[in-house]
Image: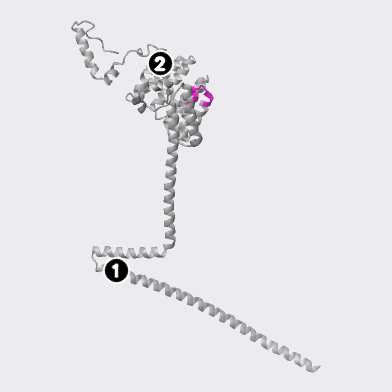
Amino acid sequence: MANENEQSTRREQRRAKQQPEQDGSTSAQAEQADVSSQDIRDRNARLRAKAAAERQSKRERDRARIAATSAGLDATERLDDIFVRTTHAVTLWIRKNFRWLQWALVIVILAMFGVQGLRYFQRQEASKSADSLMAGAVAQSGTIGDEEDSKAIPDELRHWDSRPMFLDAEQRLSAAEKNYKATIDKFGKTGAGEYARLQLAGIKYDQKAYDDALNLYRQVRLSTLAQKDLEVRGRSIEGAGFCQEAKSDLEGALKSFRELSNLEGSLEFAVLGLYHQARVLVAQGKKDNAKELLEKAQKRLGDDKDSAAAAYFKRPIQEALSQLDPTAVAAAGSPDLSELLRQDPSRLQRMIENLKKKGAGGPPGDAPDEPQ
């Protein structure tokens, strides 16, 4: 029993001695590991610093070499040197990036062919749509007659006038309507389709189908073409006003013609809108309001005397105004002397000669008055 106790005591003593030794060994290993890690970090930092120093040294040597090379060259040789070095750098860059450059070149070539193909297709579509639209226009401009009338046309005239001949106006309008509808079906979303819709609206108006005509005019008014083309926009508004007037919707017609007169950029549509409003107001018995609009139109024409619209609308406005108030303007049949002389200066000389002959006592028949 005593022996066992001694052995147990000895084992405990040995364990107590081994424990400090193990603790010292562990701490020594940890310290050694920290030292090794610090050495590795220091070595990497030294390697990076050395590489950076080498790169900096290489750049400085290159700059010094270039400066030394350029110092002994004249202006032309320096330009040649710059050109050679630039070409060399570009060549190296192309060789390095050749793979994706060739794909970029292929894509550019394919895109160019695609654009050209799209343009060709668009030109073909535009040509077809124009041909289809012209077929309706040719039919609408056809002549009226029978086979005997066709035979009576001289061959020389037939060579230059290739318009078709129809038995009556109804047949002519039906042929034009068929062609315009075909254009709308095939090219309804294009400019040719909108022009065909505008022309078809006019045909429907001539056929007294006012609801169909009004619907077509409104479609054209809201189209992209009408937003870009002032002529199309004005004609669609005027046509809608005519249809409303034909349907006895005078207030709607006045609204459309008022919109027409407010279009900017066109003296023609401004005067037309005022003239049509005056007509509708006369039909409503509002002559004073109509007179004000006609006077306003006359003033607009006077502000722009040299325009084609002024020359065209001057007499109709004067005639309409004289019917409402004969004292407001000269009679419609009396000539405007200043306007006539401006258009034909030689007329003044002839009138003076006629007056001299009359003053000399010549017979009245010898020197007739200048025709009106």
Tag 2, which secondary structure? helix
Whole-angstrom CA distance, mark 1 to mark 2, is 92 Å
- The residue located at (23%, 65%) in the rendering is 74
* Residue 178 point in image, percent of width and height: 49, 29
- Residue named by callout 2: 320
In the rendered structure, the answer to whether residue 297 lies left or right of residue 371 reads: right
- The residue located at (78%, 91%) in the rendering is 5
* Residue 323 point in image, percent of width and height: 41, 12
In the rendered structure, the answer to whether residue 60 lies left or right of residue 14 reads: left
Instruction: Give the amino acid at mark 1.
Output: Ala
The front one of 83 and 108 is 108
Residue 299 drawn in magenta: no
Mark 2 Cα within 10 Å, few/some/many (few <14, many 20+)?
some
> Does residue 183 lie above or below 171 as drawn?
below
Residue 211 drawn in magenta: yes
> Does residue 83 lie above or below 126 as drawn?
below
Q: Quadrant of residue 77?
A: bottom left
- The residue located at (30%, 63%) in the rendering is 83
Q: Main secondary structure of the magenta part?
A: helix
Labelled pair 1, 2 in contact (Cβ < 8 Å): no
Mark 1 Cα within 10 Å, few/some/many (few <14, many 20+)?
few
Check residue 59 in the rendering and tell me which mark sits there, or answer none. Answer: none
Q: Earlier in the sequence, mark 1 or mark 2?
A: 1
> Does residue 155 lie above or below 38 as drawn?
above
Q: Does residue 254 show up?
A: no
Q: Magenta part of the protein: which range?
A: 203-212
The front one of 10 and 180 is 180
Instruction: Give the amino acid at mark 2.
Output: Ala
- Residue named by callout 1: 67
